[in-house]
Amino acid sequence: MAIFHKEKHAGESPFESRFRWRSGAASGFLAAGVTGLAITLMGLETLQVAIAGLYGFEGNIVVGWAAHLLHGALFGVVFAGVLADPGLFAVSDWLWKVVVAGAVYGVILAVFGAGIIMPIWLGAVGLPAPPSIPHVSASLVGWHLLYGVVLGGSFYFLEAE
């Protein structure tokens, strides 16, 4: 079906593929918003303490949300950069492939970003009780998996022609 497969890169050489950073940023922002809603409903303290704490504003939900959205958009740009690789540039022609790529990317972010780098960062900025390393939980992986699936799905539809 045409909605699940588009010849976006027909006639384009893998070495001529464009880095679609705007689509990555928009997809990442959208995915971070959806994930932020899930975190707000299931673990509000994660946004208030951990994410806001990265910037020294522990307890501030507005800073937590702003940081989460910014991080999501930036990681969306990185995702777009990965998919612009000559070996992967046509992955985004298929909805299921880009969603799977997003899911894998989300799990990688959960384990390495939130599970290892974030506790180190929180300790460096002086959070009184930073999480232990590695800090990986089912909810953390689930939230990042949600981020990745929404990122991949929205990137497929938002990718600039």
Image (spheres, rainbow, N blue to C red):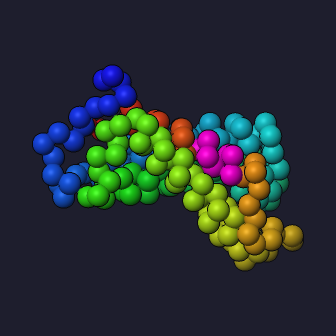
User: On the rendered structure, is 115 left or right of 27?
Assistant: right
Q: Residue furthest right?
A: 128
Residue found at x 44% / y 57%: 78
Can see residue 27?
no
Can see residue 142?
yes
Q: Magenta segment: does it hold 126?
A: no
Q: Nearer the viewer, residue 143 or 56?
A: 143
Residue 142 in percent (x, y) is at 69, 46
Q: Residue furthest left?
A: 11
Residue 39 in percent (x, y) is at 74, 43
Residue 23 in percent (x, y) is at 38, 42
Q: Quadrant of the C terminus?
A: top left
User: On the rendered structure, is 97 left or right of 10?
Assistant: right
Image position of 26 with respect to 124: above or below: above
Q: Quadrant of the N terminus?
A: top left
Q: How many marks?
A: 0
Residue found at x 36% / y 53%: 83
Image position of 148 with respect to 82: above or below: above
Residue found at x 64% / y 57%: 110
Residue 105 in percent (x, y) is at 52, 54
Q: Nearer the viewer, residue 37 or 145?
A: 145
Q: Report the span colored magenta.
A: 141-147
User: On the rendered structure, is 95 left or right of 135?
Assistant: left
Residue found at x 38% / y 57%: 82
Q: Magenta segment: does it hold 143?
A: yes
Name the dominant secondary structure of the magenta segment.
helix
